[in-house]
Image (cartoon, rainbow, N blue to C red):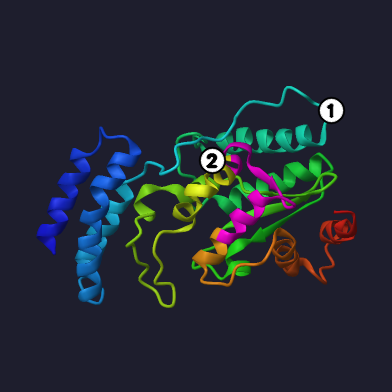
Amino acid sequence: MQEQLKILEQAIIDSQDMDVKAECKYLEPLFAEVYEETRKENFDDLSALLKLSQLENKLSRRILPVWPKLEPPIERDSDEALLQMLVYYTRKKAEDLYHCNIKEDSLRTRSKDFSQLLSSIAKGLEVPACILDMASIFHLPVPHYVVLAYVNGFYLLDITYQEFFLMGYNFPTRYYEFSPYNRICEVGGRMLGERVKSATLMIEDGYLPVSSTHFKNYCDAYAEFGSMDKCQDEKEYFQKLLEPIQGSSDKTDRILLSKVDKK
C-alpha cells in the first residue's frame, strides 16, 4: 500500500502540466488501485488513509474549468439585474471578509458563511430570501448551504457551488469512510455530460430559476449523491425545498411561502 502511494504521489507531480481532462484520465486508474486496496484493508491502515487524503487534497484543480462572474450587470432595471447585483455584492464582500479569491479558491466549507452574507445583503435590497441546508433536504453526508430567494419568481442561489468540482473528490471509484455514505464521485462529477450547461450557469451566475430544467439537473445530482429517488420534475423538487420552512414563524419565510401561488 505504501509503495502504491509513493507511485501515486509521483504521478501527481508528473501530471501537473497536463490539462484537466488528461490529468483525470492519467490519475484515475492509479487512484482506483489505491481505493481498492484501502477497501480490502477495511480502512484499518490509518497512516495510509491520511496519506491518501493528503494526495487527494493536492488535486485542487476543477473538473469543470469555469469561474464565477465578478462583473456588475450592465442592465440595471430588470429582475435578472437585481439577482446579478445580489450575487455580485456578495462575491465582492466575501472576498474582503474571508480573504479569498472567488475565481481561484475552492470555497470548500464556506457555504454557510457565504449564504449568511448573501441573506443579509438580500435583506438590504429588500429581496425575500432564506437559507437552506441541502444536506438535510437530500440526506447528504456534509452540510451545504444555499439561499432561496424571490424576485418576481423563485431562484436558488448557490455561491460556493464550485467546491463540488474539485478533481480529488470526483474519481468514480472514490469512497467515503462513514456508513451508509459509501459513495463514488460527489455532486460535481454528476453534473458532467448533458448537465454541464446547468452546472456552468450555477457556477458563473450563482443562481438558477426553480422553474427550469437546469434547476432539475442541479437537484437530480443531489438526489443521486444522497441515494434518493429523483423527483419527476422541478415543481416536485421545489416543494422539497419548501418543506424546511413550512410552519415557520419567521417573517421572511412567511413572505416566501405567500409567493408560492404566484410562481
Mark seen at residue 77: 1
Question: As drawn, is 3 to the left or to the right of 228?
Answer: left
Question: As drawn, is 98 to the left or to the right of 18?
Answer: right
Q: Which residue is drawn at 71% across and 34% down?
A: 84
Residues packed near mark 2 inside 10 Å, few (<14), some (14 to 19) or many (20 plus): few
Helix or strand or loop: what does disc 1 sit on?
Answer: loop
Count the marks: how many?
2
Amino acid of disc 2: Tyr
Question: As drawn, is 167 to the left or to the right of 6?
Answer: right
Location of the N terminus (image quadrant) = bottom left
Residues packed near mark 1 inside 10 Å, few (<14), some (14 to 19) or many (20 plus): few
Helix or strand or loop: what does disc 2 sit on?
Answer: helix
Mark seen at residue 195: none
User: Which residue is more in the foreground, 189 or 95?
Assistant: 189
Identify the main secondary structure in magenta.
Answer: helix
Q: Name the residue under label 2.
A: 98
Vertical placement of 240 versus 256: above or below? below
Q: Which residue is drawn at 56% across and 35% down?
A: 68
The residues colored magenta run 201-220
Q: Which of marks 1 and 2 is nearer the N terminus?
A: 1
Q: Which residue is drawn at 50% across and 34% down?
A: 103
Q: Residue at x 27, y 35 (%)?
A: 18
